[in-house]
Amino acid sequence: MPGLGASFGRGAATNFQQDLANSDCILIMGSNMAEAHPVGFRWPMKARERGATIIHVDPRFSRTSACANHYVQIRAGSDIAFLGGLINYVLTHEKWFKEYVLAYTNASTIIADEFADTEDLEGIFSGYDAKERAYESGKGRWVYADSPAEKKHEGEPIGRTEPESQGQGGIGKQGAGDRETGNDMQHGIHGPGLMGGASTHTSKRAASTSAHPPTDPTLQNPKCVMNLLRKHFARYTPELVSKICGCKPEEIQRVAELLCQNSGRDRTSAIVYAVGWTQHSIGPQIIRAAGILQQLLGNIGRPGGMVMAMRGHCSIQGSTDISTLYDLLPGYLPQPTTEEHHETLNGYVDYEGLPTGYWANTKKFIVSLLKAWYGDAAQPENEFRFKWLPHIDGDYSQLPFFEKMARGEVKGYFVLGQNPAGGAPNAALHRKGLRELEWLVVADWFEHETAVFWKDDPKGPKASEIKTEVFFIPAASIAAKEGSFTNTQRMLQWHDKAVDPEGDCRSDLSFVWNLGRRLKKLYEGSTKPQDQAIQHLTWDYAFDEPPRLPDGSLSRLTDEPDAAKVLQEINGYSLVERDEKTGKPKLLPGFSDLKDDGTTASGGWIYSGVFPAYDRNRARDRIIGDNPLQPNWAWAWPHNRRVMYNRASADPAGKPWSERKKLVWWDETQKKWVGFDQPDFEPDKSPDYRAPADAKGMKAIDGNSPFIMKPDGKSWLFAPAMKDGPFPTHYEPIESPVTNLLYPKQNDSPVVRYFEGPLNLIDHVPSKNYPIVACTFRVTEMYLSGPMSRFNSWLNELMPAMFVEISPELAAEKGIEHGGWLTVHSARGSIEARAMVTRRLRPLQIDGKQVHQIGIPFHWGFAGEAVGDIANDLVALSAEPNVSIQEDKAFGVDITAGRTHASNQIPTQSYARWPTTQPSPQTPKSAQPEGQVHQS
Amino acid sequence: MTLSLPIYENESRSSGATGRGTPRPVPFARAEHRSASTPTCGTIDEDDSTALGRAIDDAADELRNAFPPVRRSVPQPNRPEDLQDIMGFFTDTTLCIGCKACEVACKQWNQLPSDGLQFTGYSYDNTKHVGATTWRHVAFKEQINRNSDGDGTVQSRWLMMSDVCKHCHEAPCQHSCPTGAIIYNQFGDVYLQNDICNGCGYCVSACPFGVLGRADNEHDDGHAHKCTLCMDRQEGGLTPACAKVCPTSSIQFGPLEDLRKKAKGRVEELRERGNDRAYLYGCDDVGDYGPLSAFFLLEDHPNEYNLPENPPQPFKGQKARYAASIGVGALLAGVASWLLARSGGNRRGR
């Protein structure tokens, strides 16, 4: 989540969900929280019961809107305009929290003279290269005023050899296989998530910032961030914003007033978002806009004040922490690249580390990681085998990778817990990619679309024409495996295994571990240098003793890895000290004990501290106490801090802003930070501490600078780490019926990638052929693309069929009947669905023109018990520059009444009235369900 | 909000509760008879009745059951203090987010079958109503104000309510059941012993809330089924499945007296906050009924939630109706015989 990382330092939700109950006002936007996160929605409801105001801003009136005090309907894709309107209100009415903003943000920092804003350049920032469709932040001088001019990497960063011309994507040019791999790098190799790095990879991270850049606390300098911000958002007047969004100016003002009334010393407001913000061609910038608003209102690091990212899967935070992304190593360390500065370990550390702030410890993290992975083979003299790490040479994120796959450039693929054939944007192109593979391994509970695409895809060729060999591996369910989940609030919760899995079902961990063991065996005798990494990989996760089930009996499974050992390795251990009780290497109490000399190992530094002793797995703790933060319920990274940047809950002098909102404060007698939470700060650094000019590392962070992951300790209103601009700017979606009213010369984002081709056509702005704005959404009854819900008749009866929500006005215009069939067309394809005609959607007036919106749930596909057309077949493959995410929350469609292809889909699983009739395991007989059914 | 729940000790009750290990009744199962006694509220002490007395009582019961259903007295607990422990539901619709977790948890726990895959178009409601196989049901009512003029705020509402058996204190289903399948259990809840049910369906038509249904699918047992208020879970000291899973505490379970107090406080709280539409349905008398054991906090007319405004008690005035029908019958017979007699006389006269 670079939107948050760029603003605050860490790419994760700033607070925990339960803390929403402490908010005085909650703005839910880009999220349908009541439907997509019904359990977490308990906390906003609790806040509402305590008198807080809930505001929902969304294209559709959903169940979340029904629970909100205020609802504002806006056009899908106009979020930055709306947020810009709020920021404009805060600035023009001088409602910003002055002490907070001046002390804790970079508002007073002076930016280099050469930086030019969208206001100066009619919709683009300085440093734009139209040929490459990319910004070069170094050239554009998105830097603090004292930064040296670019030298080392100016001009021609490696990999930017050639622009990606339009039409090269979308399998348009079958001959594209001969293009150089370097072509994918023009947007920088690293996509997501660098936690608050100073800049993109077009310049050295460490070069552009310092701990004490020049500032103007009087905010008079026209080049100080605050004045640049004022200038940038001056255009977002309520009148113009209401024209873009389709709401009323009063509605924007009302929301702004509510947020301002509920922010300040004594009150805090929260902003909640989910993929309704991220899945846009400007997604991370929408989150940046929310971050700017919350910084101005002083709502970060405080109880009830936050930007809450609601993540869509149960451990997706964990999958970025202990990274499954191609461009990140565990703990948000960048994956080394083939670029020159990543050739050596020291070069990497020098380039990626920051001299000031917590990233000054980069070498400790990477060395400990290498020791954890390569064990004794990693020694100081061989750079701890830094060269064994795969050095990436291009963009291997999902969308570009599948695009490559669709061109036949990929041989095999593993899919674990994912369903790209139904759940990925332009799913038809994804299925085309799968058809081009030689082999595919799918591990899941059910045979979902990705497992049966070769035989059951109604839009695909005959099974006999598909060469892909598909291996389906039955996966163990949650109760049949142990391990930890990291949820949206960075909390690791361990769960034990209750029963052995059925039949041949195995956990994903078991699958990966055994695969690794076989690979190690395969390469055992190899003398090739490139096989050494596999040969020396530490892979000792076998159980010491045969594992037992909770009832004491032995597990029938053999060859299983011990998940606790994996977490112990991630936690880290000393290579010189021994644990007294067990004689094994001593586990580390936290990441502050990591060393860069090879005497410690840690597989993911941010999790260090979760397993401080062999008999103490803190993720397994379930202790409920008096502290409202419940610090002993599981464990949260970093260091069990539940509210990040919580130094900001106290004023610069270290006193709580108010009694009502106190969290962490400086205790003058004890000379340390105390409070309800673990301080996200050096525990004994006095608020009066001022860093000497030449200080390095954490010593360079002043006692009044709460954002320790940033080199200057401030949160960033101006954030050059973003690849599409240091300030968020409203651009239209890549398909939109209206042009950009804000900057008429620049309709959509100047740096979005399109991947255009015959399978991925795009109706560019202004979209003439597909003038209806569509937005995909979720309902509570189904889960994502359905692999876990469409095989269960108790869920299927609740939402049995694919439908599309349309307004009565649009239905009348198109002659569509409620409950009848309709067909939705986009430039990529068409799908059939039942019509849900409802007044919950209404046409909007955009700049005097009527614009219709429709809502498309994306839960159905051709596999399972309840089947329907795939909404994702309509969505374009496109990539936002920071995280390569698609835009499926706003795209162009047209609809017609009735069916067009009448695909008679036959469910791949026949309807069962009872999904299960088995007794509940380990439940007393008296408490067994009543109706254990004997059907005749 | 956590609900503090009393822990139930069946042994301490005066009622003849079934303990752990007693075979549970099996709804939907055909032709499987249960021999164990079923729990009733307030069993008669053995000492008080002689063999003859019991025989007379039994005969009277037989006689009663032989005739069309008549009103019977509601069994009461022996000790008045037991009344406080009658357990029920308070469903606060202002907290409902329409997630249907209650529906799924109910089906899963009670092993109720899915109702089939029908897209109804009734907003997000595809299971339509409470019935034999859906014991919790979430109703959706879209009240969308088309015109959002005025102060710029949209007045639209989307009402959601989780409906369930009301476990009436004078339950017409219990009165109407000719086989004695419907009883009050040790928790004071209306309980349908599915194996004793003969599938006559009197209870289905008697219930003014439309709660009961008969499992009439091809392979089903043809018996009536309804919410047991998770009697089996209560016996194990557990909260009923629906209340347990409700993420926003819209469904609360507990001793009725506590729930009523809480509910009244809740209405006051909402009124103070300016919600003058909130009121309780079934917390006090409603229609012909006394307080219901599952009552609701609503924000609109009951009909909007598919609840009767004044639920009628089918047995109310039954004696008068019987008397009236006998009277009318007698009158008609008299008129007929007079007409006959007159016509006979005329014939004779001719």
Image (cartoon, rainbow, N blue to C red):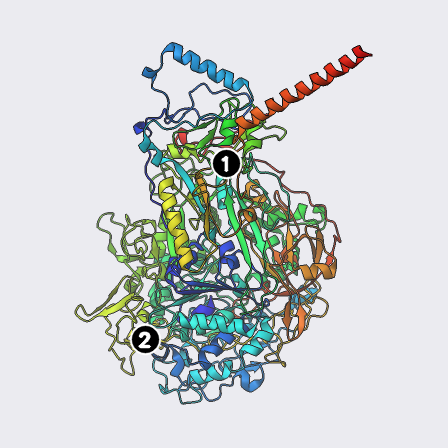
Question: Where is mark 2, residue-wise?
Answer: A705
Mark 1 and mark 2 lie on one chain; the one further toward the N terminus is 1
Q: Nearer the viewer, residue B260 or A513?
A: B260
Q: Which class describes the residues within 10 Å of circle 1: few (<14), some (14-19), or many (20+)? A: few
Residue A651 placement, left or right of A111 = left
Q: Nearer the viewer, residue A85 or A156?
A: A85
Q: Nearer the viewer, residue A795 or A249?
A: A249
Quadrant containing the C terminus of chain A in the rendered view: top right
Q: Identity of the amino acid at label 1?
A: Gly
Question: Where is mark 1, residue-wise?
Answer: A503
Assign a secondary structure to mark 2. loop
Is residue A43 among what the camera can see? no
Q: Which class describes the residues within 10 Å of circle 2: few (<14), some (14-19), or many (20+)? A: many
Residue A51 placement, left or right of A413 = left
Q: Residue at 31%, 55% (x, y): give it.
A: A630
Q: Residue at 58%, 30% (x, y): give it.
A: B215
Residue A137 locus on image (x, y percent): 50, 80
Q: Identity of the amino acid at label 2?
A: Ser
Q: Chain of mark 1?
A: A
